[in-house]
Image: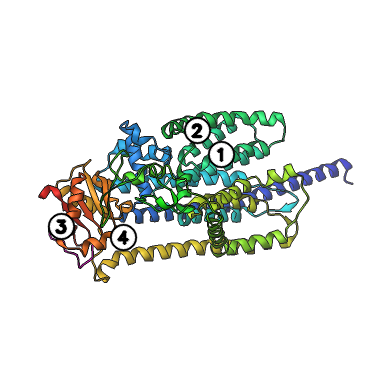
Amino acid sequence: MISPELIAEDISIYKSFSVYKTAYLFTQEYSTVNENLKKVRLLFRLLAIGLGMLHVYAAITRQSMNADGISYLDIGDAYFRADWGTAINAVWSPLYSWILGFVNYVFRPSMAWEFPTVHIVNFLIYLAALTSFEFMWRNVRRTSTDVYVIPEPFWWALGYLLFIWTSLSLIEIWAVTPDMLMAMFVLLAAGLVAKIRSGDDRLRLFLSLGLVLGLGYLSKTFMFSTAMIFLLLAWLVQDWTWSSFKKTLPTIVVFMLISLPFVAIISAAKGEFTIGEAGTVTYVRHVLRIPYPHWQGDPDRNILPTHRSQVIHQTPAVYEFGEPIGGTYPIALDPSYWYEGIDAPITIGDLTKPLLASLMHYLELCFQKQGTLVACVLVLYIGGQRSKMALPDLLRQWALVIPAVIAFGLYALILVEDRYVGIFILLFWADILANIRLPEMPESQLWFKVLGSIAALGLLANIILFNLVGFAELNQAAASGFAEPSAPAAGPLAVAETLQALGIQPGDRVGVIGYAYDSFWARLAKVRITTELLDTDAEELWRGNDALQQSVLQSFADAGAKAIVAEHVPQYADVSGWHRVGDSNFYVYAFLQR
C-alpha cells in the first residue's frame, strides 16, 4: 500500500513540474514574439533609413536648394564671423543656422560641395528625428489586461510608416528648412510627456522637457506657442494639484532660461517685443496678399512700407536694395524689414479665404492621403470598448492630440503647408492609435490583424506612389534638356563657376534679370544680389531696341553691379556681349570685361 506521504510528495512534484512547464512555455512564446517584434522594427527602421538616403542622394545629385536655405546659410556664416547685424534675425530662427554655420566653419566645403554638405546635415537630423520618434512611440503605447489593444507589430509598423510618410512626403527631407529639426523636438517633448503621464515624476524628466522645448523654440518660432501647450500638459497629465504643479516649475524655468535671451535680443533689434516675425511676414503675404518683392506701396489706400527697394530704372523697372540688409539676397534675408510700416485694413474676406483654403487642404490630407487609415481606425473605434471618464482622465488619455489639434487650428488662420503640419499629423495619430480598445474576444485579435494590415498597406502604397512620382519627375527633368527645343536652365554650380571664370570675386555686387529668390548660384559664388529686373518685366527688355537695353545695363552698372546674370533668356533675344553658361538659357554680362 502506498503511503499518504508518498502520494503527497508525487503531487507536489507534479505541481512543481506543471508550474515550471507553464512558465517555460510562456517564456518561449514571449521570446518568439519578442524576436518577431525586433525583426519588424528592424525592417521598418531600415526602410526609413534607406528611403531617407535615396531622397538625400537625389537632392545631392541635383544640387538642390531653396530660398529659405540660402538665408539660413547666410545667417550661420554671420554668427561665426561675428557679423551681428546680419546674424540677429527675427524671421529665421537661429538653431538651424548655428548647425549649418558650424559645419561650414569646421569643414569649409568647396563650391561644389556646399549644398551636398547641407543635405548630409539634413540626413543626420532626419536620423535624430527617427530616434526621437522611436522614443516617443515606445512611451506612448499603453497596455491593458482586460481588453485587446493594438498588437505591438502593427503598432510599430503603423508608427514607422506614418513617420516615413510625414518626414519624406510632407516635411520633405531635401528641403533646406528647420522643419525636420523642429519635428525632432516635438517628438522628444511628446515622449517626455508620455513618460510623465505613466507616473514617472523624476526631476530629470521635467528638466529635459524644458530643455527640449527651449531648443525647439530656437529651431522655429512656432514652437513657442507649442511649448506653452506642452508646459500645460506636463501638469495636466499628473494629478491636478499644487504638488504636481511644483514638479512642473523646473520645466518652465529651463524653457524660459533658454528662450528668453533670444526673445530679448530680437526684441531689442526690432524696437518692440517680439518672439519672432515669421508669422507676421506670412500673414502679410498670404492673408493681406501684399505683393512681394519690391512692392512700392498703395498710395490710393495710404498703405506705404517704411522701407522700399529703390527704383533705378522705370521701364522696365530695375530695383536696387543693397543697404542696409546684408546677405546673398537682402530681400529674402529679412523680409520683415521690407514690410515694416504696413498697416492695411482687414476685411472678413481676408480672414475667411485662408480658412477655406486651409479646410480644403486638411480634407485632402485626411481623406485623399490618409483615407485608408482613417477608415480602418473609425471601424475599430465603432466596434471598440468605451467607458465614461472624468475630465482629468479624459485629458490625460488624449493629451498628445491636444497640441496637434491646436497647431492645426493656428496654421489654418494664416497658411497650411504640408511641411508645417507634418509632424503634428504624426503626433495626432499617436494617442488615437494608442487608445483603441476592443473587448476581450477572439474576434478582436482578428479585427486588429485585418484592419491593421489594410491600414499599413494603405500607408505603404502612399509612400511608394509618392516616391515613384518623385523619381519619375526627376528622370523627366534630367532628360528635358534633350527633349525640348529650347535650352535648359543652368544649374547653380555652373553659373557660379562661370562668374568665377569671368573674374567676379566673393563679396562683389551682381544683378539679376529673373527671379532672385531662386538664384542659388549667388550663394555658391559668394556674391551679393543687390539689383534686380523681375522676370515678369524681362520680355520688355529683350524685345526693346539697343538704346533701351544699354540704358538698363547702365542702371545696373551705376548701382555697383560687377555683373548681371540673366535667367531663362528667350531664344529671340539679342545676347551680343553676353557670356552663355554652358548650353543653357542663362547668360552673364560682366562689366569687368568692358
- Of the image marks 4 and 1, the number of the one nearer the N terminus: 1
Q: Position of residue 582 (x, y in %)?
A: 18, 59
Kind of residue at disc 4? Thr
Which of the two marks, 2 or 3, is nearer to us in this view?
3
> Looking at the image, which residue is at 15% across and 59% down?
547
* Any part of residue 348 in sight: yes
Indicate which disc residue 278 carries.
none
- Of the image marks 3 and 4, the number of the one nearer the N terminus: 4
Indicate which disc residue 227 carries.
1
- Of the image marks 2 and 3, the number of the one nearer the N terminus: 2
The kind of secondary structure element at disc 1 is helix
State how far apart marks 3 and 4 are (Cα).
Answer: 21 Å
- State the extent of the magenta-drawn residues as a range: 568-578
The residue indicated by pointer 3 is: 578
Q: Position of residue 250 (x, y in %)?
A: 59, 28
Q: Badge 2: how crowded within 10 Å, few (<14), some, or many (20+)?
A: many
The kind of secondary structure element at disc 3 is loop
Q: Badge 3: how crowded within 10 Å, few (<14), some, or many (20+)?
A: some
Q: Nearer the viewer, residue 96 or 339?
A: 339
Q: Position of residue 222 (x, y in %)?
A: 51, 43
State how far apart marks 2 and 4 are (Cα).
Answer: 42 Å
Q: Farthest residue in the left direction?
A: 594
State how far apart marks 1 and 2 are (Cα).
Answer: 10 Å
Against 39, is 276 above or below? above
- Of the image marks 1 and 3, the number of the one nearer the N terminus: 1
Tags 1 and 2 in contact by the CB under 8 Å rule? yes
- Of the image marks 2 and 4, the number of the one nearer the N terminus: 2
